[in-house]
Image (cartoon, rainbow, N blue to C red):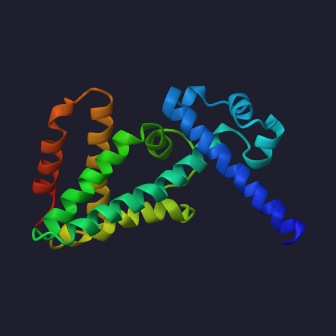
Amino acid sequence: MSVQERKERERAVRERLIVATARELAEQQGWDAVTTRRLAERIEYSQPVLYSHFRGKREIIGAVALEGAAELAVALRAATSAAATAADGPRARVTALARAYLDFAEHNPAVYDAMFQLDGGLAFADEDTPEPLKDGFAALLETLAEVAGDGVEPGLFTEVFWAALHGLATLTRAGRLPVGDAERRAELLVDRLAVI
C-alpha cells in the first residue's frame, strides 16, 4: 500500500468517525449540542482536523443526511422485499413501505431531522441531487409506481405519498397526533391513496 493510499484510508476513517460521533451526539442531546468543539473533544482530534474534512456543522449535517438516506433506502427495500412474498400483493408491499418509513423516522429522529428538517446544504429534486437522496426516492418509487393508478404520473404520486408519510412522521413526533393511532393512520393512507 502506498503512502497516499494509507493517508486516504486514514482520512476516510476520520471522516466516518466524525459523522458517527455527530449522529450519536445529535440522537442523545439534539443537533444544538453538535458543535465542532464538542466533536473535536469526543473524537480527540483538533478542530482544524475537523475543518479539514467539513467546513462546518452544515456539511456534517449533510453527511449525516446522505448516510441516513442510504439507510432509509435499504430499510424500505428490505421491508418491501419481505412483503413481496406475502399473498396480499401490492397492498402488503405498500403497507410494509409505509411502516418501514414511519419506523425509520421514529427510531432515528436526529438523522431524520438532518435529512428533512435541517439545512445540510443538499439539493433536492434537482440535477445536483446527490445519489443517496435520489436512491432514497427511487426506493419509494419502486413500490409506489405500481399503485399510482391509471393516468397518474408515478413520480408525482410518489411525491404526494411521501409528503403524507413525512407529515405523519413529523406530526406524530411533535405530539400533534396521538401515538396509539399510528398503525391505523398508515393503513388509511395506503387504503385511500394507493390504487390496489
Q: Residue at x 60, y 50 (%)?
A: 63
Q: Residue furthest front?
A: 1
**Residue 136 appears left or right of 59:** left
| Whole-percent x, y for residue 139 in the image | 36, 65
> Please, is residue 111 above or below residue 90 in the view?
above
> Please, is residue 41 above or below residue 1 in the view?
above
Q: Residue at x 73, y 30 (%)?
A: 41
Q: Quadrant of the C terminus?
A: bottom left
| Whole-percent x, y for residue 189 in the image | 16, 50
User: Can residue 126 be seen in this snapshot?
Assistant: no
Q: Residue furthest right?
A: 3
Residue placed most toward the observer, 19 or 85 = 85
> Please, is residue 125 above or below residue 121 in the view?
below
Q: Quadrant of the N terminus?
A: bottom right
User: Can residue 195 be seen in this snapshot?
Assistant: yes
> Please, is residue 83 above or below residue 179 in the view?
below
**Residue 117 appears left or right of 193:** right
Residue placed most toward the observer, 148 or 106 = 106
**Residue 187 appears left or right of 171:** left
**Residue 57 appears left or right of 107:** right
Q: How many marks?
A: 0
Q: Residue at x 26, y 70 (%)?
A: 145
| Whole-percent x, y for residue 186 in the image | 18, 48
Instruction: State which quadrant residue 192 falls in.
Output: bottom left
Residue placed most toward the observer, 163 or 85 = 85
Q: Residue at x 56, y 51 (%)?
A: 122
| Whole-percent x, y for residue 30 in the image | 51, 29
